[in-house]
């Protein structure tokens, strides 16, 4: 099991022009799903480009406890020998998912239709996050859950030996809820259908198809409309070779940093450009960003491309509609940083989901921006950022930005430090490894100035 880095506070000082040609780590969402698919397939699965972050390693450890064989290779390829659908075994110990909400929710679905009892827990942050939206449809399929108040971890999952195929209409779009149901459906006789009001990231559907599952999808092709996804349970899944695209959510941080620091030229290779994940790039282009998506192709069934960014230091405020939120839900903290440097007002709508992420991201972003001298208004499901038309002032010399144990808040404000007039210090960067191991080194390689707090004048 990987451990989080003992990083502590980090200071990000104003940077000069950034430059580099890089590939950010593998996509976290796809990495979780590739491990899970390999664990319930027959035969060997080989995964290249897997993100070896703490979150993903927690999922790998849980799947080993459920009987799958998983080994990282010296060649960078992870190999999985699966149990076949319905073949998982009861774990002997509690499955500790650390900070991984994705891993916990996907495993809830997988476990729901296996006739075994298992226990899930996580760190303090994960145990505060609600799971009721996942529990409810899985209970309709026959599983039982014992949870803390509000459907929170720790929980017991009592899988059913008589799973029921269902049709579930999601009131709130959520790729994790959808994926949990689809994974439960793998070991369920009959056709299970999930109907979502707005298309969410479809990595589960794409990967299941790669492994030989017939997945029917109606609608959702452009990421702007709803979709109905269905599959017939108990198919024969066979091991595959899977390549993992570079994570667009991780790519968001060097992208915004390069846009905000004038004179920057950065290229990000093999970045995922799945239509359900590119809301940030659409928004940045609306704001006047100078970026180009080049060489579109496929990797492991996913569309990828190279992203070329030129930092002109000029962005305009825009309104970001609520219907775009599912396609960029993890990128709002760093988008708010871009908005802080833009000219005019940016309004971000449809953000209710951010209240129940690793932290209350609406509150955390608003608090941090205010400390950096940016005028911001936070509502229950929106943020309004009055841009500074250039570098924000930055915090006072003794002020520290609270990250609330949230990796994306930490990275977003380190990006702001590269563009602000004064250095920005965050209280802790240890949790960055949950999604982006090597973040500090990669950003410094581009020309940022990130150091342990106190080391940068």
Image (cartoon, rainbow, N blue to C red):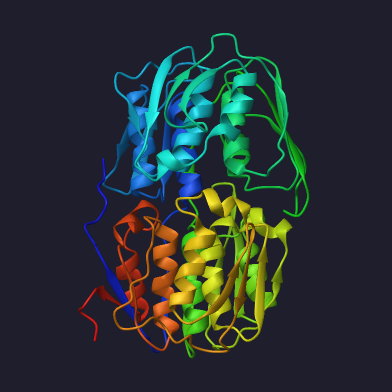
Q: In percent of the image, x 42 and y 15: which residue is there? A: 117
Percent x, y of residue 55:
38, 45
- Name of the residue lying farthest toward the top: 162
Q: In percent of the image, x 41 and y 51: which residue is there? A: 49
Percent x, y of residue 455:
20, 79
State left or right for residue 386 relative to residue 80.
Answer: right
Q: Is residue 320 above or below residue 237?
A: below
Percent x, y of residue 240:
49, 35
Quadrant where the C terminus sits is bottom left
Viewer can see residue 98: yes
Quadrant where the N terminus sits is top left
Give the quadrant of residue 73: top left
Percent x, y of residue 332:
56, 63
Q: In percent of the image, x 44 and y 13: which residue is there? A: 116
Viewer can see residue 271: no
Of 342 and 90, the residue lying toward us? 342
State left or right for residue 193 relative to residue 280.
Answer: right
Count of labels in the image:
0
């Amino acid at each position: 099991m990987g451990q989080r880095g003992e990083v502590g506070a980090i200071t990000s000082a104003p940077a000069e022009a950034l430059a580099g040609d890089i590939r950010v780590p593998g996509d976290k969402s796809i990495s979780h799903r590739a491990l899970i698919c390999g664990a319930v397939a027959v035969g060997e699965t080989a995964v290249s480009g897997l993100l070896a972050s703490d979150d993903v390693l927690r999922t790998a450890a849980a799947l080993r406890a459920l009987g799958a064989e998983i080994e990282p290779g010296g060649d960078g390829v992870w190999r999985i020998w699966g149990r076949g659908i319905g073949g998982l075994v009861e774990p002997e110990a509690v499955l500790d998912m650390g900070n991984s909400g994705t891993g916990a929710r996907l495993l809830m679905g997988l476990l729901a239709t296996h006739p075994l009892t298992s226990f899930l827990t996580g760190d303090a942050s994960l145990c505060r996050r609600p799971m009721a939206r996942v529990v409810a449809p899985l209970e309709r399929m026959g599983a039982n859950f014992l949870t803390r108040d509000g459907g929170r971890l720790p929980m017991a999952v009592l899988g059913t030996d008589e799973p029921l195929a269902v049709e579930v209409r999601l009131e709130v779009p959520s790729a994790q809820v959808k994926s949990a149901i689809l994974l439960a459906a793998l070991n369920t006789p009959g056709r299970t259908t999930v109907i979502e009001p707005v298309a969410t990231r479809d990595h589960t559907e794409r990967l299941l198809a790669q492994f030989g599952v017939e997945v029917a999808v109606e609608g959702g092709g452009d990421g702007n409309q709803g979709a109905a996804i269905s599959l017939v349970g108990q198919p024969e899944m066979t091991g595959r070779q899977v390549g993992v695209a570079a994570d667009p959510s991780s790519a968001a941080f060097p992208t915004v940093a390069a846009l905000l620091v004038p004179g920057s030229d950065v290229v990000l290779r093999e970045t995922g450009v799945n239509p359900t994940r590119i809301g940030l790039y659409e928004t940045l282009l609306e704001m006047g960003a100078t970026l180009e998506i080049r060489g579109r192709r496929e990797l492991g069934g996913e569309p990828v491309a190279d992203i070329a960014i030129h930092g002109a230091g000029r962005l305009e405020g825009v309104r970001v509609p609520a219907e775009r939120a599912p396609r960029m839900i993890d990128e709002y903290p760093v988008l708010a940083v871009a908005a802080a440097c833009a000219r005019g007002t940016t309004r971000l709508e449809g953000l209710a989901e951010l209240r129940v992420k690793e932290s209350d991201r609406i509150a955390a972003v608003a608090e941090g921006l205010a400390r950096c001298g940016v005028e911001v208004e936070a509502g229950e499901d929106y943020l309004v950022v009055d841009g500074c038309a250039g570098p924000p002032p930055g915090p006072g010399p003794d002020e520290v930005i609270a990250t609330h144990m949230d990796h994306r808040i930490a990275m977003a404000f380190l990006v702001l430090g590269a563009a602000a007039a004064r250095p920005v210090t965050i209280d802790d960067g240890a949790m960055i490894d949950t999604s982006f191991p090597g973040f500090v080194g990669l950003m410094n390689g581009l020309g940022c100035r990130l150091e342990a707090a106190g080391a940068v004048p």
